[in-house]
Amino acid sequence: MSISIIRSNMMLLVVSCCVLFSCKVKDSDIASAITSLTSAIPGASSVTPDVKDGVVTISGAFPSDSAKSAYDAVVKGIKGVNTVTDNTTITPPPPPPAPVVISPDSALTTGVADATKDYPSVQTSVNDGVVTLTGDIKRADLQKLMESLHSLKPKKIVNNLTIK
Amino acid sequence: MALQDKYKPLTDAASSLGVTNLQVREQNNVLYVDGDAPSGDVKDKLWDIYNQLDPDYRAGDLVLNVNISGMVGGVQAQVVTDESNLNVRKGPGTDQPVVGKAAHASTVTLISKTNDQWWLIKTAAGEEGYAYAQYLKPI
C-alpha cells in the first residue's frame, strides 16, 4: 500500500517536472548531436557551436555559403534547439596562382648561348619561348645543360639531342 | 591534371625534402615547377627523379626551375667545375671579357646575384667578377 503511494508520488513528480521544464534536452546532448550530424558538411570542423539553454551560437568561418546554410539547417532541426545565432563568416577562396612568367626570346637567346658555351656540338634555336636543342651531347653533360636551360624560364624545351 | 599526376613523385619529393616557395603550375600542356632547394643535394635528387619519370628529358612537358636557397650574398661557395678553372668575367655574360680565373675546387665569396645564371664573386686571390652560377655550390 505505502509502496504504491510512493510510486505514484514519484510518477507525479516526474510528470510535473516535464510539464514545468518542458522536458529540457541537455545542452551537452545538443552539442554532441550538432557534432555528429554536421560532420559531413565542409568546414564544420572549423566552426564552434556554443550551446546555452537551447540557444546555439555559431562562430568561426565556413568555406562557402552553401556549407553555412546546410549547417544552420541541420542545427535548427535538432530537438531542443530554440534559437540559432550564426556569427560565422565565409572564407574567401584562395586567389588563383599567378601565371607562369616566360622569359622574352632576347633574354632566352643570351641565356641559351651562355649555357651552351661549353658544349660546341649542341645547336640551339629559340622561338616564342620554346628552346629547341639539336646536335649531340655526352650523357654526363646532359643534366648539367638541362639544369641551366630550365633556370632560364623558357616556355618549353624540346630536346632532340643525340646522346652519346 | 595528367601532368601533375605524371610528375607527382617529383613534387611530393620536393615537399618532403624541404623545398620552399614551391609552385606547381600547369599551363598549355607544360608543368612548371619552381622552388628553392635547401641544398645542392636536394636539387640533384629532384633532377634524378625527373630523369626517372621522363628519361633523358625528352617529353618537353616540364620546366623544373629549382634554385639553391643557400646561394646568398656573403657566403662562401666552392667552384664545382668538372676539372677546368672557372672564368671570372667583367660582366654577366659569356660575351664579356675574362678578367680572372677561379681554380677548380677552390673557394670563392658570393657578393651579389645578378640573375639565376650569374653571380658577382670574389676569388681567393681577390679578383672580382661575374661567374656562372651553375659552377658554384654554397658551402
Image (spheres, coloured by chain):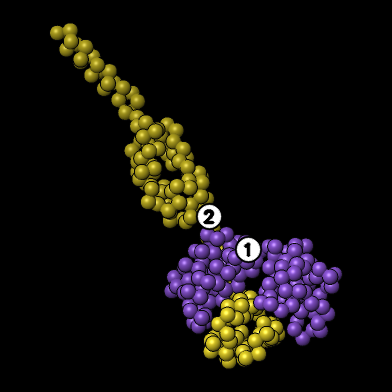
Chain colours: A yellow, B purple
Q: In the structure shown, which secondary structural element does the residue marked by tag 2 occupy?
A: loop
Q: Quadrant of residue B119?
A: bottom right
Q: Nearer the viewer, residue A36 or A126?
A: A126
Q: Are marks 1 and 2 on the same chain?
A: no
Q: Nearer the viewer, residue A90 or A121?
A: A121
Q: In the structure shown, which secondary structural element does the residue marked by tag 1 occupy?
A: loop
Residue depicted at 66% across the width and 77% down the height: B82
Q: Nearer the viewer, residue A77 or B63?
A: B63
Q: Residues within 10 Å of mark 1 (few under 14, many from 20)?
A: some
User: Which residue is disc 1 drawn over?
Assistant: B39
Pointer 1 chain: B
Outermost top residue? A2
Residue depicted at 77% across the width and 86% down the height: B95
Left or right of A159, for residue A35: left
Pointer 2 chain: A
Residue depicted at 20% across the width and 15% down the height: A8
Three-letter amino acid code at the position of disc 1: Ser
> Residue A145 in the image: x percent, y percent?
61, 80
| Quarter in which the N terminus of chain A is drawn | top left
Note whether residue B109 is visible: yes
Left or right of A69, for residue B68: right
> Residue B118 in the image: x percent, y percent?
73, 75
> Residue A55 in the image: x percent, y percent?
43, 36
User: Which residue is disc 2 drawn over?
Assistant: A91
Note whether residue B29 is visible: no
Three-letter amino acid code at the position of disc 2: Thr
Residue depicted at 35% across the width and 45% down the height: A37
Q: Which numbered mark, 1 or 2, is in the foreground of this view?
A: 1
